[in-house]
Image (tube, rainbow, N blue to C red):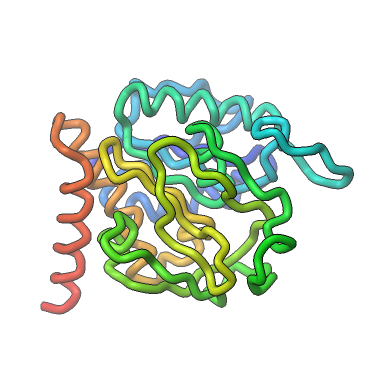
Amino acid sequence: MRPVIGVTVSRRSGWRVFPLMALAIRLAGGRALRWQTGYRKVDLDAVDGVVIGGGDDIAPTLYGGELRVGVRLDPARDKLEQEVLRGAFERQLPILGICRGSQMLNIVLGGTLHQDAYQVYDSRNIRTILPRKKVSIGSGTLLAHSARAECLYVNALHSQAVDRLGDGLQVAARDEGGMVQAIERMSDPFALGVQWHPEHLIYRRAHRRLFRSLVAAARAGHENAAQLPAAEAEAEEAGAALWN
């Protein structure tokens, strides 16, 4: 069984981002379905899991921030993804949030963002799809179990970052300046948000494992089984296979 994963993407960049998402999900054993405003009606009952992809900044009005000149926003996508996330939680669907998707996950659960995170943290302000930023992963976290790593080198394309955590979330990783780089739930449904773009890094095992964990959680959810243990078991099996 190949779980179906609904993937939200931007109207502007979805044509080039979705194929990468679809490949990552296929390599993980799933099948991707593209969602974007004006393209296809979202049907959460037709999928087993959700990826909220990256893209434009999230409107600051959603978390008590201030509108700024020159920031590119997509209110229609904001609305779509809020509805997708709320519906996913209602249906106990596993979720992977990527960059703005991680931020939207936090907002939907009541959290806030730093509008310009690099003014708050002493973090390297780099913008690249190459893995040039080091992040440290908290021990015992879902991310640590999924990636099977204590630290990762990641890419960086963001300006916003998580400030106050949403309900039920914990920090899973930070960069060298202390900026939040991953958030997660530690109970079902599986929900993991990463500030980087693992779809651009599928040539590295740890980043492929994030998609494998999502697909394993989706398969477990489809069978009414516990999602987090299934996700962690998949990561362990994948790691063992690489060494045997």
Q: Residue furthest left?
A: 244
In this rendered view, identify the residue nearer to me: 19 or 97: 97
Estimate the x, y position of residue 223 in percent, counting from the top left. 14, 31
Estimate the x, y position of residue 187 in percent, counting from the top left. 26, 40
In this rendered view, identify the residue nearer to me: 213 or 161: 161
Quadrant where the N terminus lies? top left
100 relative to 51 in the view: left or right: right
159 relative to 186 in the view: left or right: right
| Residue 169 vertical placement versus 79 (above, below) | below
| Residue 191 vertical placement versus 195 (above, below) | above
In this rendered view, identify the residue nearer to me: 40 or 97: 97
Quadrant where the C terminus lies? bottom left
Residue 140 placement: quadrant: bottom left
**Count the marks: how many?**
0
Estimate the x, y position of residue 78 in percent, counting from the top left. 63, 31
What residue is rendered at 81% in x and 45% in y?
A: 71
What residue is rendered at 57% in x and 50% in y?
A: 162
Estimate the x, y position of residue 129 in percent, counting from the top left. 59, 67
Residue 158 placement: quadrant: bottom right
What residue is rendered at 32% in x and 23% in y?
A: 91
| Residue 138 vertical placement versus 216 (above, below) | below
What residue is rendered at 42% in x and 21% in y?
A: 43
| Residue 104 vertical placement versus 20 (above, below) | above
